Every structure is written in structure tokens, then in C-alpha cells.
Image (cartoon, grey):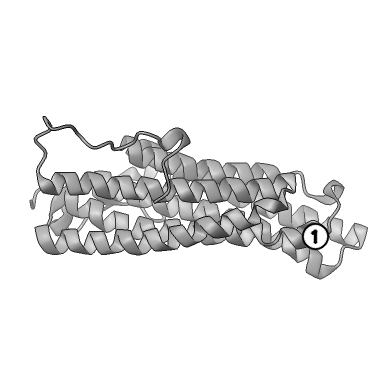
């Protein structure tokens, strides 16, 4: 397990002997802790990838690979734990929504780790490009997509569905920054005679940051589903809230 650090530290701590939670309730708290542990590791991977690309700190690449192995193992552990909880306790309503959402979230977290690796490993190609030719929108793209991920994990921890919805709304901005990087850098490649193979290393890195935003959006949708029992896929704005798809009856509070 990766120790919780930074903004996620101290989250979902176990209760003391006076806490009268049932075994199932304790196991659900353990499940939440596992998700936050995994998210903390992924957040570290993204931070390291940003430093590699933005600050040219290539020596951090091995640390990214090392954390990736732990993240892949954690995904398997979380999915197995979820299956065990369903089999033993046959949960319904909010508890079942939590478990179903966590299974999907673990998959998205593993993908986020893959994107961080894909960003970091492209540095050797990008290092051949002069810093003067790197699009100015690359840094805002990296930081904005990273912020989306951090915000959605905070939304999960705080059980804040409105914060999760705001993460979904940020996705258009990340998509726009990715398009700016592509448009501006293709023009720079033509002006500065940057070879295609080298240039596409940077463009594909930009695409990976855009996919981090997509994964953060997917995580946010799962947080809303867990907390409200509503499916908001493809419905990101607050004005469309009335069009939200209701959860299946087996996941509804009216059917405990």
C-alpha cells in the first residue's frame, strides 16, 4: 500500500473501541481507504510525470514505473474486496452503489496511472525539442488536468456531489487546451522544421493529458452515482440536472 500523503492524509481513519460500527460498515470504510490510497499513488505518478515533462527531470522516470506496479496490484485487490463484500453481505441502496462505483473507479485509477507512464516515457523524444518551441499552453494543460483529478478525489472524500459535477464541467477547458497545443505546435513544427517523429512525441503527450481529464470526468460521474443514485454520463451542466437518469431500482434508497 502507498502511504497517504498531502491533501488525502488522515482520511477515513479507523474508529476507536467505542465506535459501534458493524463489521460491514467497517469494511466499507476500509474500502474507501483503499480507494484513497490508490488515488494518492496515482496522484504522485501524475506529479512526477509533470516534473519530468515540465522541468525536464528525467531521473524521476524509474520512480513512476515503480509506483505503477503497486497501482496495478491495488486495482486487483480492490476489485477482489468488492466481490467479497457483495457475496457476503448482499448490499443494497447506497452501499451497493458505493461498491459498484468503486469497482469502476479502480479501473479508471489504473488507467490514469497508465497515462502518467505514457507521459513520462515520452520525455526522451520531447527533450530533443528546444524549450523555446514548447507550446505555452502545455503547462496549463498539464496543471488543469491534474487539478481535475485532485478535485474529484476530494469530492469522493468529502462526499460532495456538487464538487464532482464541477469537475465534469472542467473537461471542456482541458479539451480546448489540448486543441490549442496541437494547432500551435503543428504550425511551429512547420516553421522550425521539427521532424515529425520528434514533434509527435509532444503532441501525443498533450493527448495523454487530455485523457487524464477524461478519466477524471469518469471518476466524477461515479461519485455522483454513488452519492445521488443518478447517471450523469454525457450530461455535465447543472442546467441539465433534471434530465439525469435515475439509478436502477436495486440501487435506489426506496429498495433497501
**Within 10 angstroms of label 1, few (less than 14), some, or many (20 or more) residues?**
some
Residue at the extreme top of the image, as rendered: 18
At x 11%, y 39%, the residue is 21
Residue 61: x and y, percent?
Answer: 64, 56
Residue at the extreme right of the image, as rendered: 192
Front one among 172 and 205: 205
Above-or-below relation of 75 to 24: below
Let me know if residue 57 appears in the view. Answer: yes
Above-or-below relation of 177 to 113: above
Mark 1 lies on residue? 186
Residue 1: x and y, percent?
Answer: 39, 51
Let me know if residue 173 appears in the view. Answer: no
Residue 184: x and y, percent?
Answer: 78, 53
Above-or-below relation of 182 to 174: below
Residue 204, picture quadrant: bottom right
Taking 182 as reference, is 246 left or right? left
Taking 38 as reference, is 55 left or right? right
Q: Secondary structure at mark 1?
A: helix
Residue at the extreme bottom of the image, as rendered: 197
Residue 131: x and y, percent?
Answer: 83, 48
Callout count = 1
At x 33%, y 36%, the residue is 11
At x 85%, y 60%, the residue is 189
At x 49%, y 51%, the residue is 42
Amino acid at each position: 500500500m502507498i502511504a497517504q500523503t498531502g491533501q488525502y492524509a488522515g482520511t477515513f481513519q479507523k474508529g476507536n473501541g467505542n465506535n459501534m460500527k458493524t463489521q460491514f460498515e467497517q469494511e466499507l470504510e476500509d474500502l474507501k481507504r483503499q480507494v484513497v490510497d490508490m488515488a494518492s499513488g496515482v496522484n504522485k505518478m501524475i506529479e512526477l510525470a509533470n516534473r519530468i515533462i515540465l522541468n525536464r527531470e528525467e531521473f524521476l522516470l524509474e520512480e513512476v514505473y515503480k509506483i505503477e506496479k503497486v497501482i496495478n496490484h491495488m486495482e486487483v485487490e480492490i476489485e477482489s474486496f468488492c466481490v467479497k463484500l457483495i457475496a457476503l453481505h448482499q448490499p443494497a441502496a447506497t452501499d451497493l452503489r458505493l461498491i459498484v462505483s468503486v469497482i469502476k473507479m479502480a479501473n479508471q485509477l489504473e488507467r490514469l496511472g497508465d497515462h502518467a507512464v505514457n507521459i513520462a516515457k515520452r520525455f526522451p523524444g520531447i527533450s530533443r525539442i528546444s524549450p523555446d518551441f514548447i507550446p505555452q499552453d502545455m503547462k496549463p494543460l498539464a496543471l488543469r488536468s491534474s487539478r481535475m483529478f485532485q478535485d474529484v478525489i476530494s469530492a469522493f472524500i468529502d462526499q460532495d456531489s456538487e464538487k464532482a459535477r464541477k469537475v465534469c464541467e472542467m473537461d471542456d477547458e482541458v479539451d480546448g487546451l489540448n486543441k490549442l497545443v496541437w494547432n500551435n505546435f503543428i504550425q511551429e513544427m512547420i516553421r522550425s522544421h521539427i521532424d515529425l517523429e520528434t514533434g509527435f512525441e509532444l503532441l501525443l503527450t498533450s493527448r495523454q493529458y487530455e485523457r487524464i481529464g477524461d478519466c477524471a470526468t469518469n471518476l466524477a460521474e461515479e461519485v455522483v452515482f454513488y452519492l445521488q443514485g443518478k447517471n450523469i454520463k454525457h450530461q455535465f451542466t447543472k442546467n441539465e440536472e433534471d434530465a439525469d437518469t435515475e439509478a436502477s431500482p436495486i440501487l435506489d434508497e426506496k429498495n433497501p
